[in-house]
Amino acid sequence: MTGRPSYYVTTPIYYVNDKPHIGHAYTTLAADVLARFKRLDGHDVMFLTGTDEHGQKIERSAEKAGIDPQTFCDQVSTKFKDLTGAMNFSNNQFIRTTEDRHKKSVQHLWSALEEKGFIYEGRYSGWYSVRDEAFYAESELVDSENGDKLAPTGAPVEWVEEPSYFFKLSAFEDKLLELYDSNPEFVMPKSRLNEVKSFVKGGLDDLSISRTTFTWGVPVPGADGHIMYVWIDALANYLTALGYPDEQGTDYQNFWPADVHIVGKDILRFHAVYWPAFLMAADLPLPKRVFAHGWWTNEGQKISKSLGNVIDPYELIETYGLDATRFFMLREVPFGNDGDFSRRAFVLRCNADLSNGLGNLSQRTLSMIHKNCDGQLPEPGELTSEDNLLLNNIEQTLQLVRDHMDRQAFHLALDAIWTQASAADSYISVQEPWKLKKTDPARMNTVLYVLAEAIRQIAILAQPVMPDSAAKILSQMRVADRGFDQLGKAGRLAPGITIPKPEGVFPRFELPEEDSEQ
Ligand code: MSP
């Protein structure tokens, strides 16, 4: 225990059937920004991501690749782990469901459900989608053009008949509805809560939670030939990482229940219906929130391997740099909505907010100080009401950003910070420090000091989204202490520090060809 408030944020664990793409990067980015924000804001943070390695989908992918499943998982999981480095994700752990600690944890959870009488043996016959790793009721299926039945997600389904253990999900209908009513922020955004509610109100069937027609999974304790349904296996990762089933003296004690599970809208049912039902059945506390984000399209088209339009996060980083990529994804689209990834929107947004915005503001200010003040931060005179207004507004931005972050409203948090960058820009235009050099050098010193101080605070606030770029700006001003406790007067810059000739932090991008020709 550290005495600081704790914060536990998770991402879904990713299937290792394919290499990572922008969808995976997006989910983890959101969690990373929350984790970084909370650390800077004085919390003891646990940020978990990892890979989901069992089930029929992975078994078939390994078979197709002609490699044994474990070697296949090792290879693909490494690609997800590498992405965390490339995207500068600050996860505390990277969990893999093929680890022994996880098998032990999920088997314990299974036994707890069994002991409490929520598991029974039966036979499953019904529809299953390997792509979604989900069971579907006949009534949910849709007919494809060629007459095949499809899952509502468009994934193919197959008829399955096999001995299986079932979880008494039907016993949790009322309890789940009570949960959604008593804690309306358990599922966010609100539109998604309504979706979940109507699914539960439609009636819950018991859930098949073991499979017997293939072998790539965690064995069901004491039941030969049964392996666990991949979703009960996968969801338990959130507990495994904390040391469950050991509850005392472990991270479990400190971090469970999770503050927020970040998930995509496609996997909300598993997190907002099955997961709380499993936890209630095992008598474990429930996570505080499940936030479902939307999906990206690429230049207006659904992203799919068959269309060949999958967006590779490495290509984005290579073309635009890491922090612009991180910024765009969270600034452009309200978290929770679907969004379109367009290169034109990317270039316009990043040029306006980064190179012409914060970049230009800090470049201009630091250059003026370097040139006009002998490379030293000048001593300010008495602050005017305009100076105080700018600095006070920035100081108050932390609370706004905090509120937005607590609702996963990243675009609003960024908007609040960039509003201050625009305010500093207007302040320069009004104060015209370049004219003051001759007319009133003492006032010029004050204006430049106030601007440097504004930039320091804006850069501190921008760190969760753009850690490298904010660090570059702060290093140019010799700022070592960068926590949110340094905002406001607490961390004021010391006059006299050396300000070297600044280097540009944000490059300007060219519009894609078809646009620039117009
Ligand atoms: N293994 C399960 C999760 C188990 S969690 C206990 C899984 N994995 S996944 O690899 O298929 O997907 C993980 C995440 O990527 C989901 O949150 C999904 O929404 C997200 N995305 C996949 N494609 C996406 C887009 N095109 N856009 C945004 N996110 C998308 O599901």
Image (cartoon, helix red, strand yellow):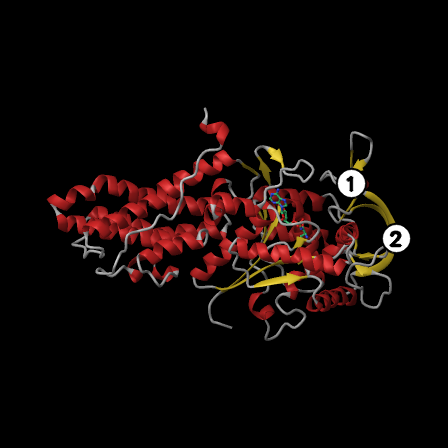
Q: Which mark is residue 156?
A: 1
Q: Image quadrant of residue 172?
A: bottom right
**Residue 349: percent from left, percent from top:** 44, 38
Q: Residues within 10 Å of mark 2 (few under 14, many from 20)?
A: some
Which residue appears farthest toward the bottom when viewing the image? Answer: 249
* Label 1 beta carbon less than 8 Å to ligand 1: no
Q: Is residue 381 left or right of residue 293?
A: left
Name the residue: 58% across, 32% down: 300
- Alpha-carbon distance for marks 1 and 2? 19 Å
Q: Is residue 370 left or right of residue 251?
A: left
**Residue 439: percent from left, percent from top:** 11, 44
Q: Give the residue pinned by disc 2.
A: 162
Q: Is residue 516 left or right of residue 315?
A: left
Q: Secondary structure at mark 2?
A: strand
**Residue 319: percent from left, percent from top:** 50, 43
Q: Image quadrant of residue 241?
A: bottom right
